[in-house]
Amino acid sequence: MTPTPTPTPGQSPAPQDDVIRVVTWNLEHNGTEPDGDTTRWHTAMDVLADLKPHLLLRQELTRAHLHGARALWAEARRLGGDIPHIPLLASATPDSANPVGVYVDPTVFDVVEYHEHITGLWHPIANPVVRLKGCTTNLSVASFHLCTFDPARRANEAKRLTVLGQPGMAALIGGDCNSYPHTRNETEPLPDWTTITDSSHYEHRTIERDGRRVCDTRPDEILSGEREGGQPPVFRELGHYAATELGQQHSNPLAPTASLWRKDQGPMRRIDRLYATPQVATALLRLEVIDTDRVRTASDHAPVLAEFSHTKLRQALSPKPELAA
């Protein structure tokens, strides 16, 4: 185990294991059935209690704003216990009552700003800006749920997310992309549409390119595709980063995430992903897709866990002395 670094005066101690844990999870309809049964929600909270995320990026916080945001705060308490996580919920829209949100561990991060990015009638992006305790550089965090039915909207939403990766910014974003990775070393190949009978799904997940219909990989290309001339992408997609840059072998960082339930849309695909600006990505230790019996009971999506070195993340979010003068 990596020893916990000694905090400098005025700096809060690091997590016990010197690891910052970040999870993104689409919990189908917030783990609640139409009749109000919350059995799946309680199962999901048990899963999260084991993962102990310091940042939780959530999708489908269905009706969590009702009754004084009772469900939102209940989850915050289950995550943090005596010191609840800070919940930040985006707005629901006429198109969807399933907003996204972010939970922040206040023992590790301070929340310094909160923004909500409106990209149409679909899900607004929840974008708190946090500061790792002891650091001076802000970290922009975002939870997103790209449009399920319109590839053009997804591309627009991905373009909006790139504003969080402008030069000089540090960002960590994640969510349900409802589209496919553009890289070639995936565990699962892109769908063979001749074997999938759901014509609606075909319309939702394909685009026209060079005169033919192909799988929609545009959001991933926008967020993490290299530019012509070898220029770096806006973000590093952390599953691909773990598999290639880190050479992760103890678990598969490219494992598919959804759907754990439906069998009429072909094999599972890796549609839930985490992205980070390059300096933040260098602090990544590992990435894991959590696919267990409890997860499959709770939701049709598997959570994605990224673990970062607290020490390296603090270095990434601290200006060099010559720049701070």
Image: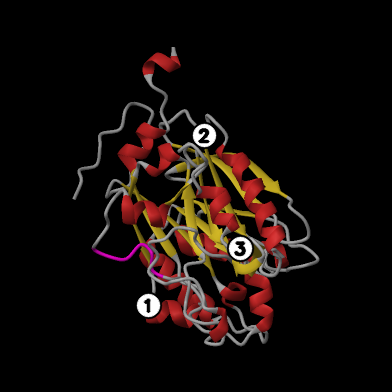
The amino acid at mark 2 is Asn
Q: Position of residue 110 (x, y in %)?
A: 51, 40
Q: What numbered label is drawn on residue 160?
A: none
- Residue position for label 2: 138
Q: Are marks 2 and 3 in contact (CB under 8 Å)?
A: no
For the C terminus, give its image quadrant.
Answer: top left
Query: First in sequence: mark 3 or mark 1?
Result: 3
Q: Which residue is mark 1?
A: 292
Identify the residue at image location x=48%, y=30%.
Answer: 137
Q: Nearer the viewer, mark 3 or mark 1?
A: 1
What is the CA distance from the residue labelled 2 to the residue labelled 1?
34 Å
Q: Give the structural element (helix, strand or loop) at label 1.
A: loop
Task: Name the secondary structure under disc 3.
Answer: helix
Where are the magenta residues, as a range?
250-255
In the rendered image, residue 2, in percent from the top left (x then y), is placed at 20, 46
Q: Amino acid at mark 3?
A: Leu
Q: Nearer the viewer, residue 91 or 160?
A: 160
**Which residue occupies 28% across, 48% down?**
16
Give the image location of residue 209, x and y in percent: 64, 61
For label 3, the residue is 72
Q: Earlier in the sequence, mark 2 or mark 1?
A: 2
Nearest to the observer: residue 206 or residue 117: 206
Residue at the farthest front position = 211
Q: At 50% across and 48% down in the image, what residue appears?
A: 224
Give the distance between the C-alpha atoms of the residues marked 3 and 1, in whole angstroms. Answer: 24 Å
Image depth: mark 2 or mark 3 in front: 2
Decide which of tag 2 and tag 3 comes sooner along the chain. Answer: 3
- The colour scheme used here is secondary structure
Residue 1 part of the magenta-drawn span: no
Circle 2: element type: loop
